[in-house]
């Protein structure tokens, strides 16, 4: 069958009609859709199942199947009556699929391959392209190293894909891996044979202790040579630990990036992940769960291909060696007392934890099995297994059911598909996270810490367990296009800091999410993050005097928006929500002005400071504070910041007037002289008021800018207790 090329995934979406369909895993819309592959005990596809032959269990409870169909090639095959085959009409209904409305995507990702692995992966990728695929199967090619790099956009032009696979497997990313391994082998040889079965770490630890060990001073009896060998091995051991963390982080985030936009199209989506494996480093357990959760929500199945090929060594050898190293270092800690601390001793706990993650093939297997695929490993001939991948993509059952979820609490719900027929092997997803409907809006990739925050945003009334502030401030860019700064301000005194062990640091933390929604309720931008807090007993008082401050920038078209912000006190298990609407003014050629901000502090601009930051003023960065409350006498002056954008066609000079009121009672006004516009046609202005002369109360300060007959107005508030 001839294959036709299309330009990219975006072209597919347009051809479907410009619509963005919901994610296939519609956990917020009652029904769950599953792609199910069924094979017999010989590994052959089973295509004659009837609806009653499959049972679906959600969190251990059987749920009735609401729709059942076989997708095969370009056909959607439904049994008569869709669910119950009738005796009088045994022939299923075959309906031709719209090739673009039922697109099937295959993403080939090649991850950090050495020379041998590149050759095997290239052969496997080219063998895959020899298989026949329906015309609605489109493939893309990526390389994943420190970041994800696109080699070929989605296409079904086989020649383009062959060239992309060849290029992706011809890089020299790991050119020096074999050199490093050879040096490590030489240094181990210099230490001497491990006659007692010690690990490399145990041997180097013995040298450091001066106890010799089975290797003594090395085969030549040269203490200096043995010491240098120890130094080199320590360096390589540290590098190996760092590589485990780096490769794991880049692989997980890269895979999340690779699938994060695939919710835009319905149909079956698969990722063929060619890799030598990677571990999940400490601190990446949560992003790992995000990856699997996102794949399940977006109906993406991973097929992991261990490109190391036929491996005769025990993949657990590295795990055992690292565990021995950790044990050896722990023993040395007790022996050494207050003596010199070696790298192995300092990293004993980390090494013990990482030892359980050193079998990197386990990670590949978990990724595949959790998303409905399978692992291809321990072979140099991938053709038969890749043929099964092709069959999975071409032939599968679509099953939907109502999970009957009463509370979308973000918990993981296990899904199991069983068959009433004997000796069948079933591939399907392991489960999903029960997310509210809003969590699926716009294909948001959710981290687990976001789930309770998303739920809080949907609660009525809003939880307000501690005070914080958030606001959206509007500005104009260089071309007078609207810009917006989202500000979140949380007093740390309102958060919980716990001293788990007397004398040790106080610890706490917060997480936040801010959604900017348009007038139609759609999310146009999301900001999210976590922040740990820690202080010694001596520092805790000063820490509580501070604020957590977040500022994010985005471009918005003129109109009315809503800012929805949720913040969680992680240690205190408390959550608060704020919702507020704001207006981005229409851009006109005349006089304009920004929002007015009260300035908390001023710091020096750094090399990393964005030139687009509206709070950059010459060589300084201004930090705003939102609706502040001050103790009377704690401050002597208040500084206000605003930007004026004069009408270049009006010869009159802009003038500023500030009007103060306390508790609704006008106090007076003051005219202010403004400087000339800068090279960008704007006037940045900071005004300072003597706060020590103000009485306690709630203050509102109005700012009026006039130029000729034009007037603009903004205001800001603060409280003095």
Image (cartoon, grey):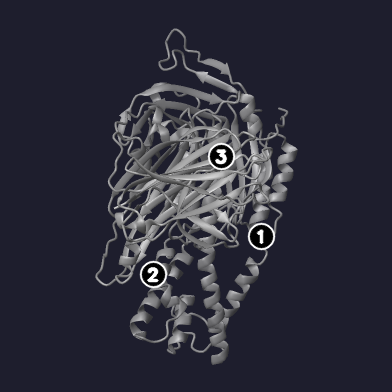
Q: Earlier in the sequence, mark 1 or mark 3?
A: 1
| Pick the front one: 263 or 417 | 263
Q: Position of residue 457 (x, y in %)?
A: 36, 38
Identify the element where label 2 is drawn. helix
Using the numbered discs, state the Cα–Cα distance from disc 2 to disc 3 in whole angstroms: 66 Å
Q: Nearer the viewer, mark 2 or mark 3?
A: 3
Horizontal side, residue 663 vs residue 80: left or right? left
Given contact means CB atoms under 8 Å apart, are the residues at marks 2 and 3 in contact? no
Q: Position of residue 641 (x, y in %)?
A: 50, 51
Question: The N terminus is located in which quarter?
Answer: top right
Label number found at residue 173: 1
Using the numbered discs, state the Cα–Cα distance from disc 2 to disc 1 in whole angstroms: 31 Å
Label number found at residue 349: 2
Q: Earlier in the sequence, mark 2 or mark 3?
A: 2
Label number found at residue 608: none
Q: Position of residue 18 (x, y in %)?
A: 60, 26
Residue name at image x 45 percent, y 30 percent:
521
Q: Which residue is mark 3?
A: 706
| Pick the front one: 297 or 61 | 297
| Pick the front one: 383 or 712 | 712
Residue name at image x 66 percent, y 28 percent:
135
Decide: is 409 above or below 491: above
Residue name at image x 51 percent, y 62 percent:
603
Q: Residues within 10 Å of mark 2 (few under 14, many from 20)?
A: some
Decide: is 93 above or below 339: above
**Residue 76 in view (yes/no):** yes
Horizontal side, residue 577 vs residue 680: left or right? left
Q: Position of residue 279 (x, y in %)?
A: 49, 58
Q: Nearer the viewer, mark 1 or mark 3?
A: 3
């Amino acid at each position: 069958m001839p294959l036709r090329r299309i330009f990219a995934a975006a072209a597919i979406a347009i051809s479907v009609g410009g619509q963005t369909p919901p994610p296939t895993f519609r956990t917020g819309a009652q029904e769950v859709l599953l792609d199910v592959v069924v094979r017999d005990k010989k590994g052959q596809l089973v295509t004659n199942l009837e609806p009653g032959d499959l049972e679906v269990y959600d969190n251990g409870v059987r749920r009735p199947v609401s729709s059942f169909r076989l997708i095969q090639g370009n056909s959607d095959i439904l049994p008569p009556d869709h669910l119950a085959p009738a005796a009088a009409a045994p022939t299923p209904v075959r309906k031709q699929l719209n090739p673009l409305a039922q697109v099937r995507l295959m993403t080939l990702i090649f991850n950090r391959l050495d020379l041998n692995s590149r050759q095997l992966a290239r052969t496997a990728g080219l063998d895959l392209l020899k298989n026949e695929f329906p015309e609605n199967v489109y493939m893309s090619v990526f390389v994943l190293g420190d970041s994800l790099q696109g080699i070929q956009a989605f296409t079904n032009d086989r020649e383009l894909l062959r060239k992309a696979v060849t290029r992706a497997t011809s890089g020299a990313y790991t050119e020096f891996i074999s050199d490093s391994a050879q040096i490590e082998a030489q240094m181990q040889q210099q230490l001497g044979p491990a006659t007692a079965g010690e690990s490399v770490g145990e041997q180097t630890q013995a040298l450091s202790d001066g106890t010799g060990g089975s290797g003594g001073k090395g085969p030549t009896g040269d203490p200096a040579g043995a010491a240098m060998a120890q130094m080199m091995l320590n360096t390589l051991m540290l590098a190996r630990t760092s590589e485990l963390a780096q490769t794991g982080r880049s692989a997980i985030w890269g895979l999340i990036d690779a699938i994060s936009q695939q919710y835009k199209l319905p149909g079956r989506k698969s990722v063929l992940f060619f890799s030598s494996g990677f571990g999940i480093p400490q601190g990446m357990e949560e992003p790992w769960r995000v990856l699997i959760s996102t794949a399940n929500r977006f109906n993406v199945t991973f097929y992991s291909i261990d490109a190391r090929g036929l491996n005769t060594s025990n993949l657990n050898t590295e795990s055992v060696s690292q565990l021995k190293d950790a044990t050896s270092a722990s023993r040395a800690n007790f022996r050494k007392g207050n003596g010199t601390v070696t790298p192995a001793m300092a990293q004993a706990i980390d090494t013990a934890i990482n030892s359980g993650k050193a079998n990197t093939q386990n990670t590949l297997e978990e990724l595949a099995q959790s998303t409905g695929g399978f692992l291809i490993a321990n072979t140099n001939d991938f053709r038969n297994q890749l043929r099964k991948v092709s069959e999975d993509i071409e032939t599968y059952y679509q099953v939907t059911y109502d999970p009957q979820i009463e509370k979308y609490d973000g918990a993981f719900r296990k899904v199991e598909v069983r068959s009433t027929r004997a000796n069948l092997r079933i591939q399907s997803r392991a489960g999903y996270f029960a997310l509210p409907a809003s969590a699926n809006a716009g294909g948001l990739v959710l981290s687990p810490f976001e789930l309770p925050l998303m739920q809080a945003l949907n609660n009525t009334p809003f939880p307000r367990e501690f005070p914080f502030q958030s606001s959206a401030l509007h500005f104009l860019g260089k071309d007078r296009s609207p810009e917006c700064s989202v500000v979140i301000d949380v007093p740390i005194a309102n958060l919980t800091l716990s001293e788990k062990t007397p004398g040790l640091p106080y610890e706490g933390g917060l997480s936040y999410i801010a959604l900017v929604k348009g007038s139609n309720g759609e999310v146009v931008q999301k900001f999210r993050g976590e922040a740990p807090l820690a202080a010694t007993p001596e520092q805790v008082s000063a820490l509580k005097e501070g604020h957590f401050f977040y500022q994010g920038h985005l471009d918005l078209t003129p109109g009315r928006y809503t800012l929805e912000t949720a913040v969680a006190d992680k240690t205190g298990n408390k959550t608060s929500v704020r919702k507020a609407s704001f207006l981005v003014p229409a851009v006109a050629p005349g006089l304009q002005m920004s929002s007015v901000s009260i300035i908390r502090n001023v710091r020096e601009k750094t090399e990393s400071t964005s030139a687009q930051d509206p709070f950059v003023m010459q060589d300084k960065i201004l930090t705003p504070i939102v609706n502040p409350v001050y103790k009377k006498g704690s401050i002597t002056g208040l500084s206000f910041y605003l930007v004026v954008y004069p009408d270049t066609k009006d010869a009159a000079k802009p003038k500023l007037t500030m009007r103060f009121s306390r508790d609704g009672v006008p106090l007076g006004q003051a005219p202010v002289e403004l400087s000339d516009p800068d090279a960008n046609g704007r006037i940045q202005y900071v005004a300072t008021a003597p706060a020590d002369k103000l009485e306690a109360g709630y203050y509102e300060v109005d700012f009026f800018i006039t130029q000729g007959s034009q007037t603009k107005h903004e205001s800001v508030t603060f409280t003095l207790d």
